[in-house]
Image (tube, rainbow, N blue to C red):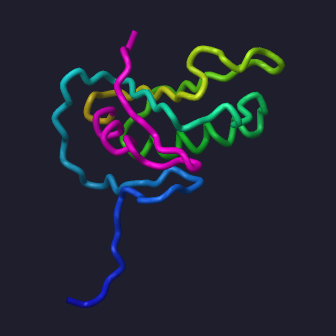
Amino acid sequence: MPNRPRTNAYQQHPTNTITTATTTNRPPVPPEAGATKVVRLTKMLSPDNRLEDDDEFEDLVEDVIEEARTFGNLVKVVIPRPSPGSNPAVAGVGKAFLEYACLDSSSHCRRSMDRRWFAGRRIAAGFYPEE
């Protein structure tokens, strides 16, 4: 067999960006037990991320939106952040919440994003109640 470079949708080492998986022509995936249209990404940010800096926050949101759209029709992205000068321990800081139009997209996102690397940190992806 000729030598070809190996391709792998899941990266095996930390990088500064979320890696992408090819989603063209993928068949529908049955929803997982307990699946919701909202995916919660944890462990992707740390307290040293400067979320109160507007420019850095905008860059982060753009990166997350760009990657999240590869999994389906993205409805909403919420990334909690502290107000400038406030306590950085605001509920939800360090997490990202992605709402999709259908369970197929959220299930695909959860499976694909779980255990990926982002900015040197391994993401944990799970479902979150839609309420």
Residue placed furthest toward the left: 30
Dividing the picture into quadrants, the one containing residue 84 is: top right
- Expressed as whole percent of the image width and height from the top left, the position of residue 131 reads 40, 9
Looking at this view, name the residue that lies furthest to the top: 131
The span shown in magenta is 106-131
Compared with 26, 33 (above or below) is above
Instruction: Give the mark count.
Output: 0
Left or right of residue 127: residue 50? right
Q: Residue 14's spot in the image, x, y percent?
A: 52, 55
Q: Which residue does the image show at 46% across and 32% down from the upper left?
A: 41
Give the residue displayed 61% in from the left and 41% down from the top: 62
With 83 as the anchor, is 47 left or right in this view?
left
What x and y, as percent, mark residue 76? Answer: 49, 26
Q: Quadrant of residue 112?
A: top left
Query: Of 35 and 11, which appears nearest the observer?
Result: 11
Q: Is residue 13 magenta?
A: no
Q: Quadrant of residue 12?
A: bottom left
Q: Report the side of 21 relative to 47 (left or right).
A: left
* Residue depicted at x 59% and y 48%: 119
| On-image quarter of the N terminus | bottom left
Whether residue 97 sits left or right of residue 60 in the image: it is: left
- Residue that sits furthest to the bottom in the current view: 2
The correct choice, above or below, for 93 with respect to 104 in the image is: above
Q: Measuring from the top left, give residue 64's x and y in whole percent.
A: 54, 40
Is residue 115 magenta-colored?
yes
